[in-house]
Structures are given as structure tokens and as C-alpha cells.
Image: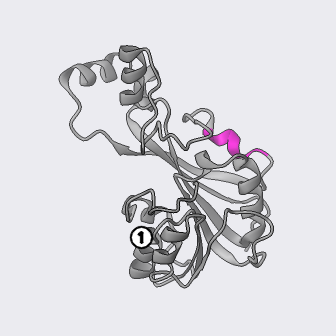
Amino acid sequence: MESSSIAPPYAHWERTEMLAYLPPTVRRVLDVGCNTGAFGQAIKKKIGAEVWGIEPNPEAAAIASTHLDHVLVSVFNEELPLPDNFFDAITFNDVLEHMPDPWAALKLAASKLTPDGVVIVSIPNLRHIDNLVHIMRERDFQYEATGIRDRTHLRFFTRKSAPRLFDGSGLTLTRLEGINEECFPSLLRKIAYFVFKNYLDDTRHIQYAIVAKRVNAATP
């Protein structure tokens, strides 16, 4: 996520659909790319956890600091004063696709987790049906201010490729499922989903939610 000298580039969005992926017992959460702190604010309201945020946009970080316990104005990197083995959960809500090296970011996140900690990711689905229709109909890939074709995206992922992000990260996937499905698909789309179910099933959702735990998670 790139910084701006004008205003936060994204809305104050709670992302409440991602709360369901947080273990109810978490005590400390790190929200990477926290924007204005809406998601962390929702976490604190729901489970009362201590929430840290990392945000490179200084205007967004200033707002986030009014909602979260600690906010660092920076990109996520090894130079940050973040303790190892400290966080019960680290979240990346539509953030990894903005990073030059998301693989390194996940490896770093693993080192900051408690033994039973988890990484929680929301990642845009390049094969979402609206995006496929745009490419086929317009024969184009028109970047936009937000969404799957956000002009600041450096990486693009599908349901099939997203799990490979975690190769060599010290994390192993425990959940991968689609989120934010189209609520009222047209009759034509309903027919297409039925007839070509195996091919189009992964095009229904705007994003995928992923949960991964440390490979060396503590055993009872």
C-alpha cells in the first residue's frame, strides 16, 4: 500500500466478514496495512484484544492511532521494532498483493507469531466473474482506484495460486474459502454456474480468506 500526502487512499472499512477467522482467544493482534484502523477497531469491540497496526500512509496511520493500541508508520519489514513470538494473530486484509515480496512478508510474519498463532489473509480473486467479463468484453485490463484491478496492485492471485504464497514461509494453510460472493447473480450467470460448475466455481467470490498456522505450532 503506497503512501499519499493528500488523504488516506481507502475508506474506513471494518471488514467484519474477516472477524470470523480470528480465534476468539487471541490477546494480541497485528494488522498489517491497517489503513485507518477500522478492522482493528472492530476486533477490539468484539473480543477486546490488544491491536497493533502498521500503515505506510501517514494520514491513514494518524487516524488509526486514535483507534488502536500501537501504530507504526512504515511498510512491513524486518527493521520494525516488533517482538518475536508475540502476536496471536497477524492479519493482511487485501495487503499482500500491494507488496513487492509478499513471500518474504509471510515468512517475517511467522517469526512474530506465538507458537499457536495464525496469519489471516484476505486476497483478491483475479478470476472473479466481473473481472473475467471485463477482460472478455472489453479485451482490456483497465486499472481502477480500488478493487481487483486496483492500480497499486503489484501481484495477482487466484484460488489455485494463492496457496503457493505460503511455500517456505514457515506457515501451513488450515482454511481457504471464498468471501463476498455476488448476492443476486443474473439468470444467465446462474445457468453458467450450474452448467460449468467445475470451471466457474472459483469465479463467484471477490476475495479468498486464508488462515495459516505456524508449522512448528506447539503441541498439547
Residue matched to label 1:
38
Quarter of the rendering containing residue 181: top left
User: Is residue 193 shown above or below 80?
Assistant: above
**Residue situated furthest front in the rendering:** 5
- Which region is colored magenta? 162-167
Query: Percent from the top left, x then y, of residue 72?
Result: 63, 75
Query: Percent from the top left, x then y, of residue 24?
Result: 49, 75
Q: Is residue 8 left or right of residue 83?
A: left
Quarter of the rendering containing residue 88: bottom right
Query: Percent from the top left, x then y, of residue 65?
Result: 51, 80
User: Is residue 54 shown above or below 155?
Assistant: below
The quarter of the rendered structure image containing the N terminus is bottom right
Observer able to see residue 67: yes
Quarter of the rendering containing residue 131: top left
The quarter of the rendered structure image containing the C terminus is bottom right
Query: Percent from the top left, x then y, of residue 8?
Result: 45, 62
Is most of the magenta stretch helix, strand or loop? helix
User: Is residue 133 shown above or below 120?
Assistant: above
Category of crowding for the residue at label 1, using alpha-carbon neighbours closer than 10 angstroms: few (below 14), some (14–19), many (at least 20): many
Residue toward you, 24 or 98: 98
Observer able to see residue 218: no
Secondary-structure class at tag 1 = helix
The amino acid sitting under disc 1 is Ala
Q: Is residue 97 left or right of residue 135?
A: right
Residue toward you, 141 or 197: 141
User: Is residue 25 shown above or below 124?
Assistant: below
